[in-house]
Structures are given as structure tokens and as C-alpha cells.
Amino acid sequence: MSNKFQHLALNIYALMLKNIYPIILLICSFGIYFTHYGTPGAMFWDENYHVASAQKHIDGVMYMEPHPPLGKMMMGLAEAVLDPNANIDKQKFNHTDHIEGSDTPAGMKYTGYRWPSVVLMAFSVLFFYGILHRITQHQLVAFLFSSFIIFDNALVIQARAAMLEGIQLFFVLAELYCFVCVVTRGTPIRLKDYALLGLVIGLGISVKVTSAIELLLFVMLFGVDQWKNIQNHNYRKLAQRLIITIPIGVIPIILVFMSVFYIHIGMGTKVIAGKTYKASPEYLQAIQRGDTWSPSTFVVGLRDNLKYMSEYADGVPRLDESKPGENGSFAMDWLLGKKTISYRWDKDTVNGQVEVRYMNIVANPIIWFSVLGGIVLSLGLIMSKFIYGHKEKYTPLFYWICAFTSLYMFYMIAILQIERVMYLYHYLVPLVFGMLNLALVFSYIYREDILSNNKHMWINLSLYITLVIAVFAFFSPFTYGFPMTENQFDMRNWFSFWKLEVVK
Amino acid sequence: MKTIPFNKNTVFSILLAIIVVAIIHRITPPYVEDVFDVVVSKNRTTITDIHQARDIETSKVVKVDRLNLEEKSRFRHPKLGDIGYSNDFFVDIDSTFLVKKAGDYVFYLGSDDGFSFSIDGKKICEWTHERPFTTDVCRVNLTAGQHNFKVAHYQGYGNAGFVMKYAFAAHRKQYLAGENSRYLEF
């Protein structure tokens, strides 16, 4: 018996030792994302919309929204399960799409609605680490660069809220991990790999449609799958494979998307306060009949929902930088963290000194500027091969750099085509691509030093990561709403183009 | 062709050092010599006169080297930046100075809005109400030795600023208050 116990303990110890890096990352990630995530005890930015929508899921109220409903469904589920507001009447949330302060009952807690974003984002570090580990085949490099996803101020503030980006990034990283696993597995790519990828991409798109950028992974997967046929110009075989793989990949996406909307439409069993959201008479009649789960209602409900999403997007104003208080910014400005958004602030006077708790989305400049540097370096590397004809030193790593640079570039190009106003947090998805890319560019440049365990390189890298963490800590008052005096604010107002605004 | 030796790790170290130095430089608070204690007090009500009854909400003491507190039409120190409030505040300076050479002195007091200036308890000059930035010329005869001066200044709304200079009347060369010369020492 004792031998068995000893054996089990040794196995657990060995397993922990083997996974020590992901375990440390997970502990750090939960420490940063999960600690006191119920603060501030008031809604900020888009929480006012998403909490209203999530509550409608709980109460079975029909609603339509510009984003697909999966994120809000998860928020509603967490609120219903954790039930931190058991004795609070939240009925007013069902009467509006944007909760005002006056509609918020006293004692309201947001730990339920925020839970999915916080927890999924905290777990995302495992995917991030897994991606880097599988590509670089080096635990320590993957471990050190995974700190990017934990210690970026913009990611942390956005994910510690009842907003969609934390959930979206979890699925985006899950898709990437799935893709990397399939490609690095070393066995032929099977049709079920396309289906699995489609399934995860479908989940991402069901949270936020910008996740559709990951559809590019299908193109890449097909490229890897059919590399020999591409090289041999075997168009017939390529076409044959394409005819099979397109439906195998796309059908799961459609199924997931449709299933999410089926549940959303089915759960919307009542219309409150005459809020019909341009629903068609057929759809409204079906709700009145209590027939929301029938296939016919799903068809009209889905049509009405998609129409609403499209019309809403058309109605969003364009960026107007001359407008006072404009929070939106031009996509190319995001690369350097312009412009920050003041989500909320609370002013207090302590011992005659004015202190303000800011909740601002602000970049960790070390990470953001490095990501930009990484993109510049990788573009140079790609050009050196395809334009100047230089041979790459490490072929697999080179093509991974191509993949992540392409994802980054295509996302930015796609965003630049959108006319409606966009915000700094729309950069978080390409930022994650850029973080992964930077780790790979570093591995490419310092490959020999990594393999030969060059001390100078490890000291440099450790100092760099320490700097990332120190700068995160320095800007953390903006992320966690720690009180700051005007002088402390000025000390953090590094760049005028960030457009941070002091509260006097 | 020989290539220039290029150590990637050294380049990385240099880059890191530059970043760290730049950050330290950026976050180190500006330092100026502690010559005057400038008391800035935010008033709860609108200020229209330097002598009106004060209703102070909050006060702060800012240590400055020179009384050159007008920049970009704001109550602002060249190194310390904005040191006032947005509007309706009083500024009080109470300090000693040493007269090295007895004689006639000229004090130049520029303010937006009002001010009151006295030496050894005797009012020398004042402008009691609002105005755009304007400089008053105030003459006084000083004996050699230690003296005390007091300045009260207020800012209502709009542009702001306060500058105090001095000159030995016979020579006319102007010095900022806080700047030692062969005539005065602060």
C-alpha cells in the first residue's frame, strides 16, 4: 500500500516537474487576472451593454445585438451559476440595452458576468505557451515569452471585465494551438483535423465576428497538407482535396454558429417593454405562441438577428478625430498604443490631496513597441527571401514567422477597410499574433545561442522579461484602478500621442 | 570581403540599457533647488479680488527655485509643469532675502490675475482684481541686511501666470526672484 502511495506521489511529482513552466504561468496568470476581479464595483465601457444582454439570457428575454451571442450567453450562465446577486432585483436590466447608473441596484456585484472573460483569459496562457513550445521546441523560451499574455496592461483591463475580448482571445489562441498541434504532429493531416479547427473557429466567430481572421488557418493548413502537390503543380489532386476539405472545415463553423443562435433564439421567450429590435411579425408571433425552439422560428429569428447585426454595423458613426471626447482611433495608430480610452474614473480627496482611480486601457509600451519591432524584422526577413532570394537559416521557423506575420498583416488590412469607428482594443487580436511572432523572430535570430545555452543571451532575455513585468507593474494603477495623484499620473503619461487625460 | 564583427547579444544588451536609461529619465521627477515654498490654495468660490475672504477647499506646497511661473499662459513652472489648479486659486509666498547693497530697487511683478506685494510688512504695490498678464513696476529703497517679502496672488478663470523679477535701480539689469546676484540673495 505504502509502495503504491509512494509510486503515485513520485508520479505526481514527476508530472509536476515536467509541467513546472505551465504551472507557474497559470499561477501568475490567475494572480494577475483573477485577483479582485470584482473591482471596480461598477460597470465600465461596454459592460453596460453586455451585462444587459447577459441578464436577458437569464430571464429569457428576446434581444438582438451587433455581436453574436455566445459571449453574452457565457456571462449569463456564469451569473446564473455563481449567483452573486441572489437577493437583488435586476429586472430593470431587461428594459434597456445600455444600463445607466440609475438602473443599477445597490449592492450589485459583477463577479458573475465577468467570470468567463477573466477565467478563460487566465487559462489562455496555456495555449500561448503550448503554441510556442511546440514550434520552438524549447520550454524556457516558451515560458519567458508567455509572460507577454499575462503582463500586458491593455489585455488585463479588457479581460477583467464583462466584455467580449477575453473570451474571444481564448478561442483565438485555442484555434492557433489546434492548428499548431496538427501541423507539428508529424503525421499526415486528416479530414477530422479540418473539422476540429472549424469547430473551434466557429466558437470564436460566435463570440465576435473579427475572429473570422482565423479562417486563414484553413488556407495555411491546406498549404501544409498539400505542399507536395503544390510544389508539383498537381492541380487535379489539389482540386480534389479542396472539394472535400472546404465543406469539412466550413460545415462545423456553420453548425456551431447556427447552434449558438438556435439556443439564443430558443431562450428568447418574451418581449419586454415593447423592445422588438426590428423583429419581423412572424418572429414576434412565434414568441407570442411560445414556439421559440421550433425550426421555423429559428429560420426567421436567425434572419432577423443577422439583419439587425448588419443594419447596426451600418449605423455606427465613422471616426471623427475632431469631435471632442472621441474615443475611437485610426487603426495604424494602435501600433504605438494610440489612443488610450478612459473607461471610468473616481475622484477622492485624501488628506487634502486629490487622488483619482483611473480605469484606462493603456498599452504596456515594452510589449507593444517590441511587437511592432518584431513585425518590422519579420517583414524584412520575408522580403530577404522572396525578393532578394536569400536562403532562410531555419526553414520551419521561417514559415511559422510567415504564418503569424500574415495573420497580423491580414487582420490590419481587413480592419483598414472598415469605415465605422474602431477602438484601441480592436488591436488586441493582432497584438497576440504579434507577440507570438516576436517570440519566433527572437528564436530565429538567437537560435544558435539558444541551442548552445549562451549565458549572455539568457541574461539579456531575462532582463527583458523583467522589464516587461516592471513596466506592467508601473502602469498597473491604470489597469486596476489604484489611486494616483496628478504627479503620479504625469509620471506615467509617457507619450502625448497616447492622449491620456488627467482628472483635476 | 571581411564583414564587420557584430555580436547580437551585445547589441541586445545595449538596446536594453538604452531603454532602461530612457525610462528612468522619464519617470524621475524633475528636481529644482528649494528656494521658495509656494502655497497654492484652491478656493471653493469664484475669486474676483485679492483681498476677498478665502474659502479654501485644499492647499498644496510646491517648492520652486525661481518665481517664473508663467508658461503657455498657465500657472506653470518651466521644469515642474502645471503647479496650480484649473481656476480660482490663491498663491502665497513668504520668504526672506538678503540685501547686499543698500539702495533703490525695482521689483517687476507680472500677474494674471491680481497680486499684492509687501516687504517687511509694508505694502509696496498691488493689483486687486482680474487682468490679462501685465507687469507692474514697483520701486522701493532697501537697506543692507535681511528682509522679508510676501506675495499674494490669485487666479480667477482663463489664462494664468505669475512672474517676479528685480533689478538694482541704478543698473537696471533684471534678475528673476530666486536668482542670486551681487545685490540680492535668496
Image (cartoon, grey):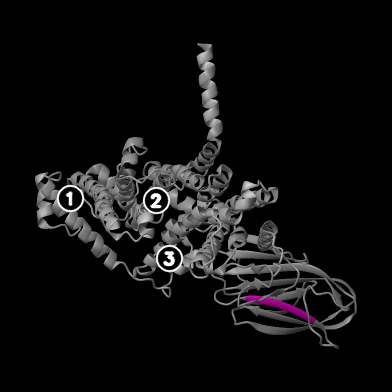
Choose top left, top right, bottom left or bottom right for residue B161. bottom right
Q: Chain of mark 3?
A: A
Decide which of tag 2 and tag 3 comes sooner along the chain: 2
Mark 1: secondary structure = loop
Residue at image coords 60%, 68%:
B89
Amino acid carrying mark 3 in the image: Asn
Count of numbered tags: 3
Mark in front: 1 vs 3 = 3
Q: Chain of mark 1?
A: A
Quadrant in which the N terminus of chain B is drawn? bottom right
Stretch of the chain drawn in magenta = B161-166
The residue pinned by badge 1 equals A271
Q: Nearer the viewer, residue A480 or B26?
A: B26
Is the residue marked by circle 1 packed among few (<14), some (14-19), or many (20+) residues within 10 Å? some
Tell me residue A33's x, y (percent). 48, 44
Quarter of the figure with residue A317: bottom left
Residue located 53% across and 54% down the image: A440
Q: In this orientation, which residue lies closer to the viewer: A296 or A279? A: A296
Give whichever of discs 1 and 2 has the lower sequence position.
2
**Residue where numbered disc 2 is placed:** A172
Q: Amino acid at mark 1?
A: Val
- Among numbered discs 1 and 3, the one appearing first in the sequence: 1
Identify the disc placed on residue A413: none
